[in-house]
Image: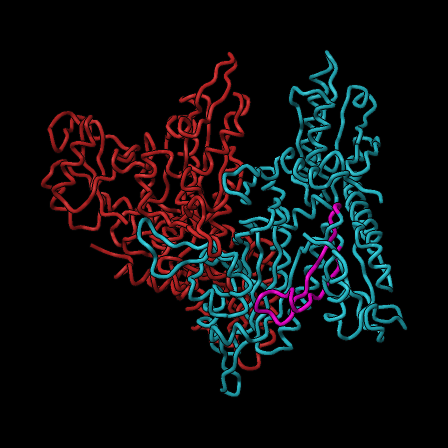
Chain colours: A cyan, B red
């Protein structure tokens, strides 16, 4: 089986370090420092996420980092799910606190008590807020930068309250669409999957997740959307007055995306030379490298500056006029995923042209100076589509559709996603498959139906869903 | 003495609550929730701060929220200053942690260990980074929203390393200029003050602070800039190789601004009807209120929509077409500090005019539709200047320059800043004054010199500095 990166795990760590995205040497295990370049990458991704959240009617808020133990523990399923991984603040100075404070693992139990103060009547609904914050998990598993960490320093969580189940379900659809747009724009392929009961968010009635595939062959959960029904509303007494004067509990949903978005962007598109980024998400979109020869330095640099000035009105451009030789410069900027390199040499200037080099394919082309701006527009668009298409095709090739347990077992050690028909009782039958392999049941694929006439791979009854199994981060 | 707000403390709490800036009812004392309107106000202020930091060559980063006890305690003065107010994370799940983790009270001891990894040679200097994060202080004093809190959820801290003391001192000047620009643009008047030794940042050689005055008569420290010399560099072994091959410690500076910026914006400019905001920092800059009469609703609303569409290309505009009556709408938007109200009624439409109302003065004017855009430009500029000037004049009127201890004592109970000449040993003599009054020595005014020939109010020697005393938050 062909791989874009020989040893993904090693490649990934090296890119994070060499491209100066995050520094893993902070003296607390599983907690990272975002370096300036990484921070800009993070910003471009969170800006896009923020844009989508605002467009879909969510308003940004910011809640405290800590949650009193008494509140975190109010919803029984929730604390059962999170209790073991909570960091506890127990002292202020040398004094023990009256009530221990949890570093939030997620903010349901911080936000809904405030919802109960803010929501009075049906006129206050829907109430849709989001925040982008740090959340904390005392992970006992092996940590991995941006993928499994103890401080998730980029967590977008949306929390929404509605007057009816129908409205809450409509929100699940609105988020589904927004999340698809989010990943599509980043060129990251995914399956939309309903999780089995034992893999739902702690306290949710239903969890929908987006899974992508990393080059290692493991799936990565990159987004979740939870129908919380009224459980949290009952526990935190979030009620509203209906038009008829009676009072009822609200329906709640919550929806998360973390810095795994950036892990996916790096892992899915990168190649052996480092990052490959869709132009929209590249901190530097264009690097200009002057190719200087003795005696021609000034004329080349002058032209390079002129072109930089022209381009920086619309692009994030760097002119690399450092002392390094061109080869070193190419390496430096390729590693950082700059989508387009503009090379300018003395002969180019004579001919009134510049050379463009694509990061994703290495392809070179010459364009006349006058056509440069237009050429960059269409090239950026082309790169974007080409990167997304390549990722999509690779992803599709790694999804294996089969129709028997034997075929599933044969594929179990392959770095692929397995999909196979399951009956109405998909959790039960899907679990029986899981018990025979190393891959786990991720749930059922919400976008694809089993082939007409196919049967459940376990019980042989008519198939109703496509089960999905994979190894996962 | 005249006051813009009768009882500032009460007024302040009410505005925060009624304008939905922050909610003080979160179940942890001294920790607040930023509501959607407040969050937008915060964003406009932090965007401006970020712009200035980037312009002056600082690159944004993001460090973990916690600092290991072993690192926090490395610099003796630092931990002496902060130790009593640190929140400690002691457990992960039910397991005690090997090393306790502090919720960062500030990030010197988190950032400089990484500097020691990032800085190798003089070519890596200067290194100038900043982050906007939460910091935590277990305050035992009375807490007050945005002013004295246990989680400062908006703290911009810049941390910079240099090859020489001269470079570090240049940075102190660069920050001084940037901070002045920051406050000037918000129309917030200030004194720039060098703090006495006992009031320096814990671990600093020198602390420069910006103090403004709140309507209560108490000064509010709204920015600080610290020359750290090489103490932290020695403790954290931050060294660089010089061009001559020898190795030396770097010089460090750090510079902070918190959400007190927003407290100042609210307190300094507000009036009895609520917020007054410079247009640049107003989440809603223009509100359009249709004045409808029976039978004329549609024509007025149509015109209002048309004007909204025209204006929203350049302004943050709201069209209030709710069911409330005009008076309720005026009250609602005045409370939120919307700088300009546009009123449109049937007669206005007939005459081809609209009515503009200034939030800061209440002044009304009619302009023809064709001149509306130009009129708004100059009106916004005028409002900005008028708000700033009013604040500046008020501030100047509250600074009392005197030249004897008796005069100082006479003013001690007034809600003013007292300024008086001190000699070379200003800390010692300034402290002697402090011991006789309720106001405290804030330090010496760096922008103003004592009158030629004046003498120290304590020892009678020739004056060299102007001491500043105030009651402070």
Q: Quadrant of the N terminus of chain A?
A: top right
Residue A317 falls inside the magenta stretch: no
The percent coordinates of residue A255 (x first, y second) are 61, 62
Q: Is residue A18 left or right of residue B469?
A: right
Is any atom of residue A151 visible in this view? yes
Residue drawn at x 50%, y 59% as measured from the top left: A61
Residue drawn at x 48%, y 60% as measured from the top left: B37
Q: Is residue B72 above or below residue A133?
A: above
Residue drawn at x 52%, y 14% as measured from the top left: B243
User: What is the span of residues highlighted in magenta in the rendered image?
Assistant: A190-216
The percent coordinates of residue A175 (x first, y second) are 66, 64
Q: Nearer the viewer, residue B75 or B152?
A: B75
Q: Is residue B364 above or below residue A288?
A: below
Q: Is residue A178 above or below residue B412?
A: below
Q: Is residue A47 left or right of residue A436?
A: left
Q: Nearer the viewer, residue A112 or A31?
A: A31
Q: Is residue A225 above or below residue B53?
A: below
The percent coordinates of residue A440 (x first, y second) are 72, 59
């Amino acid at each position: 089986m062909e791989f874009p990166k020989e040893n993904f795990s090693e490649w990934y760590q090296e890119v994070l370090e060499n491209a100066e995205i995050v520094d893993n040497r902070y003296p607390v295990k599983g907690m990272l420092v975002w370096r300036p370049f990484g921070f800009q990458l993070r910003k471009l991704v969170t800006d896009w996420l923020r844009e989508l959240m605002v467009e879909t009617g969510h308003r940004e808020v910011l809640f405290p980092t800590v949650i009193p133990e008494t509140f975190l523990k109010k919803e029984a399923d929730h604390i059962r799910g999170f209790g073991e991984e909570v960091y506890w603040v127990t002292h202020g100075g040398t004094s023990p606190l009256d009530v221990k404070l949890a570093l939030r693992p997620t903010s349901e139990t911080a936000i809904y008590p405030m919802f109960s103060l803010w929501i009075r009547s049906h006129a206050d609904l829907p109430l849709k807020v989001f925040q982008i914050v740090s959340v904390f998990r005392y992970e006992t598993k092996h940590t991995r930068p941006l993928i499994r960490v103890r401080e998730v320093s980029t967590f977008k969580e949306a929390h929404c309250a509605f007057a009816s189940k129908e409205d809450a379900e409509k929100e699940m659809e609105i988020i589904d669409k927004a999340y698809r747009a989010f990943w599509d724009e980043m060129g990251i392929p995914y399956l939309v999957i309903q999780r089995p009961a034992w893999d739902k968010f702690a306290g949710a009635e239903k969890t929908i997740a987006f899974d992508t595939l990393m080059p290692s062959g493991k799936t990565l959960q990159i987004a979740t959307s939870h129908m919380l029904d009224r459980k949290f509303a009952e526990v935190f007494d979030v009620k509203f007055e209906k038009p008829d004067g009676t009072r009822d509990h609200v329906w709640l949903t919550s929806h998360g995306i973390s810095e795994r978005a950036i892990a996916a962007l790096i892992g899915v598109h990168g190649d052996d030379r480092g990052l490959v980024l869709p132009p929209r998400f590249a901190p530097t979109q264009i690097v200009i490298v002057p190719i200087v020869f003795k005696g021609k330095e000034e004329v080349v640099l002058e032209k390079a500056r002129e072109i930089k000035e022209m381009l920086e009105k619309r692009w994030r451009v760097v002119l690399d006029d450092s002392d390094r030789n061109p080869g070193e410069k190419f390496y430096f900027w390729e590693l950082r995923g700059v989508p387009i390199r503009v090379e300018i040499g003395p002969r180019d200037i004579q001919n009134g042209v510049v050379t463009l080099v694509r990061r994703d394919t290495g392809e070179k082309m010459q364009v006349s100076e006058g056509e440069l701006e237009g050429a960059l527009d269409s090239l950026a668009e082309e790169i974007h589509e080409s990167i997304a298409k390549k990722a999509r095709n690779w992803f599709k090739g790694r999804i294996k559709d089969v129709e028997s347990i034997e075929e599933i077992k044969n594929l179990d050690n392959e770095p692929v996603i397995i999909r196979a028909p399951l009956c109405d009782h998909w959790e039960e039958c899907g679990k029986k498959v899981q018990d025979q392999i190393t891959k786990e049941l991720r749930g059922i694929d919400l976008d694809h139906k089993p082939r007409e006439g196919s049967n459940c791979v376990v019980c042989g009854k008519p198939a109703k869903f496509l089960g999905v199994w994979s190894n996962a981060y």
